[in-house]
Amino acid sequence: MNTQDRLNFVNGAFAPAKDGAWLDDLAPATGQVIARIPRSTKADVDAAVAAAKTALPAWAKTPVAERAALLDRVADLLEARLDEIAEVESRDTGKPLALAMSLDIPRAISNFRFFADLVRTKTDDASMMADALNYTHRSPVGVCALVTPWNLPLYLLSWKTAPALAMGNTLVAKPSELTPLTASLLAEILNEAGCPPGVFNLVHGLGAEAGDALVSHPDVALVSFTGGTATGAKVAAAAAPQFKKLSLELGGKNPSLVFADCDFEKTVPGVTRSAFLNQGQICLCGSRILVERSIHDRFVDALLEELKAWKVGDPSDPATKIGAGISAAHRDKVEGYFNLALEEGGTIRCGGTRPPLPPPLRDGFFLEPTVITGLPATCRTATEEIFGPVVTVHPFDTEDEALQMANGTKYGLAASVWTSDLTRAHRVSQALESGMVWVNTWLHRDLRVPFGGVKASGVGREGGRNSLEFFSEAKNICVKLD
Ligand code: NAD
């Protein structure tokens, strides 16, 4: 073991994998190994689930005020270490440090504070009959498996951990093997904040090994999974026959619908940010831009102009807006789509290449932001999730055509609509097959609202009360009144 090793956290203690195997963790900006994590097996998962099961009765009985106080202490400790945690997140993901400082870590902090407040103030439903009172009693579900992806590591883990703990569950988290570091810092912080042993457990490792063992485990009652659609299908296949509670937050190919009556000066930067923030690696990114034909060419010119300010390079440079992609394999996948787009008749209007960067960044997984035009909206490049700094732009003539294009993929996570016609905004938003729609904005998040997708983008909703309900079992109690 060396100082760069990060450990599992099981029953309140940090430990390597039982069989001593390790995985390397790379910095996407340099391709260099920055840490090792345990390559956990079923035996490690079994130990973590057993610890969570043992800790469950006492945590479930812990008063809500005490659970909420723990979440607040976690938020305070995260806040006190914001700079350090943001630096680790940026190094582990390749994202700009400025983004981790302004978005990822502040959002993780507010997730803990938000769910502390929500669980303190939540009320339960009651329904009166003439001769009886019905009320809903909520109890914890049990041991919960939290499986998270690499694009927003701490942000998404905190989004699940906070409501799950608030409702009295005990947890086993399996973060992405590509970005494990801030999950380990969270385990440290939960421990320091006084989280009892076994209430939060962390198992590092590969999806097909530790992840599969976790979601298949008979003592896991709930699976909250965020990741790719193909993996989501495997997780559902493992969990469904055991009737586990299941939430799947999956992939997307989100449309941005730009109408000729939009506020052009605001729409161009808004749509650009939606396409390229976090290297285009946010499940909500608008990767298909549908533009009313009368402004299509002007819009594309303005998009290309706007992108000149999106500097690619060193994630620690405050001027950088596009950092490294997550891995060499992922970069190869994205580059494969550049070739496919050309085969499908598209024109690469900017990007489509690796930026020339000096060492050590030369060995990182960077790509220039890429805009592709001239593709049919039904082709593979325009309908498959690429999850990189790439957008396709397509003209449309009518609102119906725009909706047909927007709804013409297997996904349905998020969409944005850019128009100054309020009636149209409502009409189009309601007709979109999408779990979330933003009008004249994007990633404008209120933590109280339902979050999730339709079709191949997921099953279930998290966010606000939806999270508290998902992480609890509702029981109706009917009391006869004399
Ligand atoms: P992924 O599906 O490869 O991995 C996600 C997690 O699942 C990782 O921790 C991985 O180790 C684990 N895993 C892999 N195989 C598993 C298995 N058989 N059983 C259990 N766990 C397994 O996804 P990724 O590449 O890390 O993340 C990118 C994807 O996540 C994109 O498709 C993106 O759209 C999606 N995503 C969705 C949301 C959302 O809220 N809808 C948010 C972020 C990312």
Image (spheres, rainbow, N blue to C red):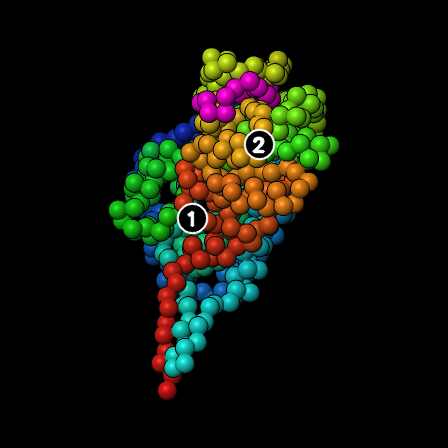
Location of residue 149 in the rendering, given as x and y in whole percent from the top left corner: 46, 36
Instruction: Work out whether 368 lies above or below 50.
Output: above
Left-right relation of 253 to 204: right
The range drawn in magenta is: 365-380
Q: Which residue carries the number 1 mark?
A: 460
* Magenta residue check for 378: yes
Residue at figure coordinates x 46%, y 42% from the top left: 453
Q: Disc 1 to disc 2, how far (Cα)?
A: 32 Å
Q: Nearer the viewer, mark 1 or mark 2?
A: 2
**Could you say which quadrant of the image residue 292 lies in?**
top right
Residue 427 position by quadrant: top right
Residue type pointed to by label 1: Gly
Relative horizontal placement of residue 243, taking residue 321 as reference (left or right): left
Considering every residue shown, the one lying at the far right of the view is 265
Using the image as rendered, state which of residue 443 and residue 367 is in the foreground.
443
- Left or right relative to 420: residue 36: left
Please give the name of the residue rendered at 53% of the width and 26% of the height, measured from the top-left corner: 388
Picture coordinates of residue 386, whole percent (x, y) = 48, 26
What residue would you read off at disc 2?
398
In front of the other: 131 or 180:
131
Q: Position of residue 110 (x, y in %)?
A: 60, 50
- Decide whether residue 189 is among the magenta residues: no
Secondary structure, mark 1, is loop
Asked whether mark 1 and ligand 1 are closer than 8 Å, the reply comes as no
Above or below, comparing residue 418 to residue 292 in the picture: below
Disc 2 element: loop
